[in-house]
């Protein structure tokens, strides 16, 4: 997944916008949005390859992101659109996006908690 994100960040952004935004063709991403997506993909790859402590810490960060997405999804969306788009006030999310964001939050929390559980078995 990280490799795909790193190799084709503009396509990932466009796919996200088509799924999440009411008028994806009327928004202007900030100049840093696509490079940030690529950086995220590279980080995913590096963390996966390094494993160990780096991977474990990334799972805690994933769990935190999951908790934010689950418990305050509207604020998380508002924060991200302020970073990702030049005119965030023009961004309109599709109806039903909040439950999807919460679903990702549950998934992220499950993955992180599973890693913590597996780690505690190893020690």
Image (cartoon, helix red, strand yellow):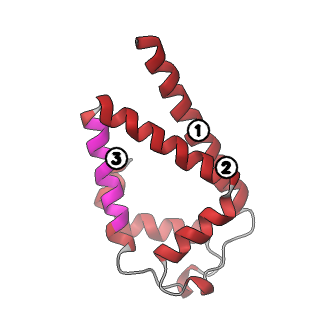
The residue carrying pointer 1 sits among few (fewer than 14), some (14 to 19) or many (20 or more) residues within 10 Å by Cα, namely: many
Which residue is at 45% across, 80% downward?
Answer: 29
Label 2: element kind: helix
Q: Disc 2 or 3, which lies upstream in sequence?
A: 3
Camera-side mark, 3 or 1: 1
Which quarter of the rendered picture does the C terminus lie within?
top left
10 Å crowding of disc 3: few (<14), some (14-19), many (20+): some
Q: Which residue is mark 1?
A: 109
Please report the residue visible at 67 percent of the width from the left and 54 percent of the height from the top.
100
Locate residue 25: give its quadrant: bottom right
Q: Is residue 88 above or below residue 7?
A: below
Q: Eyeballing the image, is 9 above or below 66?
A: below
Query: For residue 117, which numbered disc appears in the image?
Result: none
Instruction: Give the class, few, some or many, for how many residues have Cα within 10 Å of label 2's Cα (few <14, many ≥20).
Output: many
Identify the magenta region: 36-49
Residue at horizontal 61 percent and vertical 52 percent from the top:
68
| Residue under label 3 | 44
Q: Is residue 105 above or below residue 119?
A: below
Q: Nearer the viewer, residue 25 or 68?
A: 68
Q: Quadrant of residue 113?
A: top right
Q: Is residue 19 left or right of residue 86?
A: right
Circle 2 sits on which residue?
70
**Mark earlier in primary sequence (3, 1):** 3
Q: Closest to the observer: 101 or 62?
A: 62
**How far apart are labels 1 and 2 at the CA level?**
9 Å
Q: Secondary structure at mark 1?
A: helix
Q: Secondary structure at mark 3?
A: helix
Q: CA distance from mark 3 to mark 1?
A: 17 Å
Q: Are marks 1 and 2 in contact (CB under 8 Å)?
A: yes
* Residue 82 percent location from the top left of the image: 53, 76
Q: Residue at x 29, y 45 (%)?
A: 45
Tell me the chief SS of the magenta region.
helix
């Amino acid at each position: 997944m990280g490799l795909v994100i790193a190799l084709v960040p503009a396509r990932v952004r466009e796919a996200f916008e088509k799924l999440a935004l009411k008028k994806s063709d009327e928004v202007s991403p900030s100049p840093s949005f696509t490079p940030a997506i690529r950086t995220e993909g590279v980080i995913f790859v590096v963390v996966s390859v390094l494993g160990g402590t780096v991977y474990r810490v990334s799972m805690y960060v994933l769990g935190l992101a999951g908790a934010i997405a689950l418990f305050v999804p509207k604020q998380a969306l508002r924060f991200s659109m302020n970073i990702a788009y030049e005119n965030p006030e023009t961004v309109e999310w599709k109806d039903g996006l909040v439950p999807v964001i919460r679903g990702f939050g549950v998934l992220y929390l499950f993955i992180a908690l599973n890693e913590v559980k597996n780690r505690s078995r190893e020690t």
